[in-house]
Amino acid sequence: MAMSTSVTAPSLPFWLSPIGWVGKGVIGVLSYLGGVAALMISAAVSLITFPRDDDLPGFWTVLKEELWWLLLTGAPLVGLVHVAMGSFLSMQAYFGSTFLDGTGAVVGVGLLRNLATLMTGLTLSGLMACRLIPGRLGLGQGPAASAGPATDTRFPAVSHHPGATSDEPQQLPAPGRLAAPRMIATALASMLLALWGFAVGTVVGWQAARSLMGLPSDMYFLMFYRMIWFRDVVGMIVKGLLFGLLPATICCFEALRAARLSAGQNSGRPASASGDCSASSDLTAPIVRAACLSMMSILLLNMTWFMLVYHAVPVYGPSLLQPPTP
């Protein structure tokens, strides 16, 4: 008599289910972080190998296209945000301080040290999520779109190599090859747009202090010059690059997940990416997730920067207030 060899695993007691949920969540978070780190490493390796044996657009072509798009679309958004930041800091110096002479330092140093890079990075987080995830880094578009199902389930789009036939395995584009130019373009755009936002906010704060509070222009810029550190300028450049690189990496990773899900549905395979949207045309969940995670990474990195670069030194910086006298 034939006997069944299937064994049913015993179910856990209901009071142990929360432990399983916690374990599943921890594994999911570690898997996500590992995927983002692997994509960043793959992008760095692709800059060294620099392959040109496929029909994908060239590195510099994609870099220039993405950089110009980010600068043209991000300049008005970042400018409007810093119009509000400059006027807010100027008025805050009036309402929250005991003197008006320090308005230039409050506005200029506040923007240069923290707000310009922070607000630019947060703005680009949403912009890059809406840009990269619907485009899926070019996967499923162009010549690779008609190549049929991919032989590797990790990345759905394929690309013909010279001399390949329909019966031969087709070459898959490396994820780092697709993500590297977009990551570098976003990092450069973030730094340039942060400088643009700093200039806009400083000018708006100057006009607000001059017209609304009667502060002389020379006093405004003199106090800004006295309070600025060279560390602030370096920090603006470094943070501008990092606040663009991290969101771009996360958005590229989400774009690859969305492309894999879409290819799995088109070929009849079930989607294996947990947390992805249920339909290839519904990209709301990946876009919102990428934007939120990008903003969280920026806030965490910004806090780390202040703890290590500023708060760790004996004196935080020059102060507008006189030291207390006995």
Image: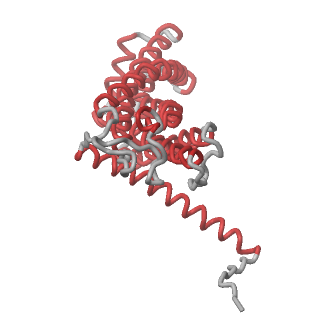
The quarter in which the N terminus is drawn is bottom right
7 versus 254 height, above or below: below
Q: Quadrant of the C terminus?
A: top left
Residue 312 in view of the camera: no
Q: How is the image coloured?
A: secondary structure
Task: Say which residue appears at 31% left-offset and 43% top-offset.
Answer: 161
Q: Whole-percent x and y of residue 15? A: 75, 74
Quarter of the view holding residue 157:
top left
Residue 239 sits in which quadrant? Answer: top left
**Residue located farthest toward the right when viewing the structure as drawn:** 14
Task: Inspect this view and state whether residue 81 appears.
Answer: yes
Q: Position of residue 242 (x, y in %)?
A: 37, 40
Residue beneath the point at 41% across and 44% down: 158
Name the residue nearer the viewer: 167 or 120.
167
Residue found at x 39% / y 50%: 167
User: In this image, 51 relative to 122: left or right?
Assistant: left
Q: Position of residue 73 (x, y in %)?
A: 46, 21
The image shows residue 8 at horizontal and vertical percentages of: 69, 79
Q: Decide: is 113 above or below 302.
A: above
Residue lying at 65% horizontally and 46% vertically, measured from the top left: 278
- How many numbered circles does the render carry? 0
In the image, residue 105 above or below residue 218 = below
Report the front residue among 81 and 315: 81
